[in-house]
Image (cartoon, rainbow, N blue to C red):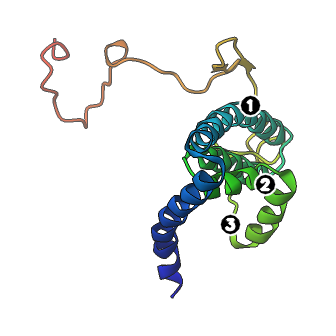
Amino acid sequence: MRSLIIPLFFLTLPLAEIATFVLVGREVGVWTTLLLVLLSGVVGAVLLRVQGLGVMKRLRETTGRGVDPGRELVHGVMIVIAAFLLIIPGFLSDTLGLLLFIPAVREVTWKAIKNRMTIVSMSAGGGFRRGPDTSPGMGPATGTNTATGAFTRSNPKVIDLDEDEFSHDDPQRPPSDDKDRLR
């Protein structure tokens, strides 16, 4: 039964949107209805840009403090969904989108779904860390961020060489087909 709810929703939503267009068009006129649809699309695009940048900033701050970013990620996804709902033509989708832009509605939604989520954090290879220190035994991360955003280490343990910059003299290794190496 549960698997039928989502397809049924996606089948009935366009019909409900069309019915809403007809009702609104009958009340306020065709041109006003079209103007409202275009206006909601523009508002959705602007809000996606402004709110999306704000969410990215809060997400960076949260991960920089070493706090689990699950809440900020879910709020960010809800804001993106809200903006897309405003961009999609239709008054029902616009109403849902505007509701998702309200922080209290997002918080209630977060509380409803957070117990159904599994949040995984990673360390020592990438992903999110728990704080400024690394895992035990790993030592602190050393290095600097450059202006381009690249991370350079002050004491690298990895030496990156091209194939022609090193040789491998192992008697147990079978001979190579490369004629330059046999000289």
Q: Which quadrant is the C terminus positioned in?
A: top left
Residue 167 in the figure: left or right of residue 152: left
Disc 1 designates what residue?
A: 50
Question: Which numbered tag is attached to residue 71?
Answer: 2
Judged from the image, the secondary structure of the residue bearing numbered disc 3 is loop
State the residue at coordinates (68%, 66%): 118
Q: Is residue 127 above or below residue 155?
A: below
Q: Residue 72 at what x, y percent from top left?
A: 77, 48
- Number of marks in picture: 3
User: Image quadrant of residue 112?
Assistant: bottom right
**Badge nearest the viewer, 3 or 1:** 1
Which one is nearer the viewer's eye here, 182 or 14? 14
Q: Nearer the viewer, mark 1 or mark 2?
A: 1
Q: Is residue 135 left or right of residue 176?
A: right
Q: Which residue is mark 3?
A: 118
Residue 114 in percent (x, y) is at: 76, 67
Q: Earlier in the sequence, mark 2 or mark 3?
A: 2
Q: Residue at x 18, y 35 (%)?
A: 174
Task: Give amino acid for label 3.
Answer: Thr
Residue type at tag 1: Val
Determine whether, in the image, residue 175 is placed left or right of residue 21: left
Q: Earlier in the sequence, mark 1 or mark 2?
A: 1
In this rendering, is residue 132 above or below 150?
Answer: below
